[in-house]
Image (cartoon, rainbow, N blue to C red):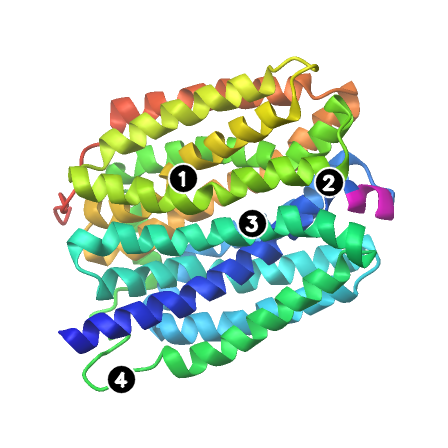
Amino acid sequence: MEKSRHYALILLTTICITYFAENFLRSAAGALTPLLIEELNISHSSMGMLISAYFFIYGVMQVPSGILSDRLGARKTILYFTVLTIVGIFLFWWSKSYEFLFIAQFLIGIGCSTFYINAVRLVSAWFPANRKATAIGILSASSGLGNFISYMGFPLAVERLGGWRTLYLWMSILLVINWVMNIFLLKDKGDIQVHTSRPDKPPVLKSIVATLKDKRLYPFFAGYMLSTTAWVFMNWMPQFLIDVRGMTYIQVGQIASLGTIAGIPGCILVSAISDRLKKRKAPLLGFSILASAILIVFLNLPTSTPIYVFSALNFLMGFAYSYWVLYFSMIPETLPPQKAAVGLGLVNGLGTIGFSIFTPIYGYFVDITGSYTTSNTLIQVLSLMMPLIFFLFIKECYGGIYDDE
């Protein structure tokens, strides 16, 4: 038991490093939006497409990710696909044209797509029920640190290093080092089996169809897709603040980075509160209401509002939106084990595809109207629908409520 506990902590540490690096790299396009629009001389909708090149394929790959986890095991899936991430990030670092950056984003999206689901499965396997959500929260919090370094680091790199590519290269090298670490750390150690394949694996298509027919998953589909509309705005926030509020790249980097760093305590505390209360629905609903309210206030602040108010609100918004981490405890507690992996993949995948579709649409409305009003109004309406879905259709699932339907 003691050996298993120590291994779980080692496992959590190394996959947190992976998730930190991957989130820095996947946030790069959003953090670099003001620079890339100017550097490449592209429209807002084209920039949205560049961001979506990562997220669309990431979303499409979520179902195969769960299936690959069953077929190959979490360790092999993570290691194999990280190689694609590494190829993509070095292509992004080298690229000077829109076309090559687009291809790089696509490769990074494929490479990163399998990581989180498999990391969650490893964490779920090696942490007890009373620590599982907290451990997943810590894993998810590492994404906030990666996003923070991306949104705050690039403006500082431009100011002090004369460009963004040096910082990007450093983080790329970190991911390579961590990949080597994972080769050695994500292995069976004595009686600890990192992954055990099931002998009764159902056909792939049958697994997908059976999970899609499970109506318990539908509220998670709707809620997660609505959640992503806020993330769309967070990706566009730097450009919005520059265009509408007249802020500098350094100033918007400070504001945006506070929202991402808030995800670190947010993911941990939201998960810990859920574990302490022994409830999932109440914290999910409460934090989603808070997040929607803060988003609406942020979008409607007058032009004269001081920068520190934007910073404080974005920190609170980033904290509140950390409720998304509860999905990844709730779905395995709602669905039977044979559906849980595919269910996680479907929810994460469809939500991410929704994000990838709406991101360029947001930019398109800015291009054709010459303002952010239409795009931001749509985001506010959709964000208000999200808590309603949770209240009406999500059931309490702490400890597992599933029956094999």
Residue 134 higher or lower than 181, as above or below: above
2 vs 3, front mark: 2
Q: Is residue 17 left or right of residue 25?
A: left
Q: Earlier in the sequence, mark 4 or mark 3?
A: 3
Start and end of the magenta stretch?
35-40
State the residue at coordinates (65%, 21%).
Answer: 306
The numbered mark at residue 322 is 1
Residue 138: x percent and y percent? Answer: 36, 54
Find numbered disc 3 in the image and state the secondary structure of the residue it sits on: helix
Identify which residue, 115 or 35, lies in the foreground.
35
Callout 2 touching callout 3 (CB < 8 Å): no
Residue 234: x percent and y percent? Answer: 58, 35
Q: Quadrant of residue 205?
A: bottom left
Q: State the predominant SS element of the stretch in magenta.
A: helix
The numbered mark at residue 189 is 4
State the residue at coordinates (25%, 39%).
Answer: 273
- Is the residue marked by circle 1 packed among few (<14), some (14-19), or many (20+) residues within 10 Å? many
Residue 72 higher or lower than 373, as above or below: below
Tell me the residue that label 2 is attached to: 250
Could you tell me which quadrant the N terminus lies in?
Answer: bottom left
Q: Earlier in the sequence, mark 1 or mark 2?
A: 2
Find numbered disc 1 in the image and state the secondary structure of the residue it sits on: helix
Give amino acid for label 1: Ser
Q: Is residue 359 visible?
A: yes
Give amino acid for label 4: Lys
The numbered mark at residue 372 is none
Q: Earlier in the sequence, mark 2 or mark 4?
A: 4
Tell me the residue that label 3 is attached to: 147
Give amino acid for label 3: Asn
Q: Quadrant of residue 142?
A: bottom left
1 vs 2, front mark: 2
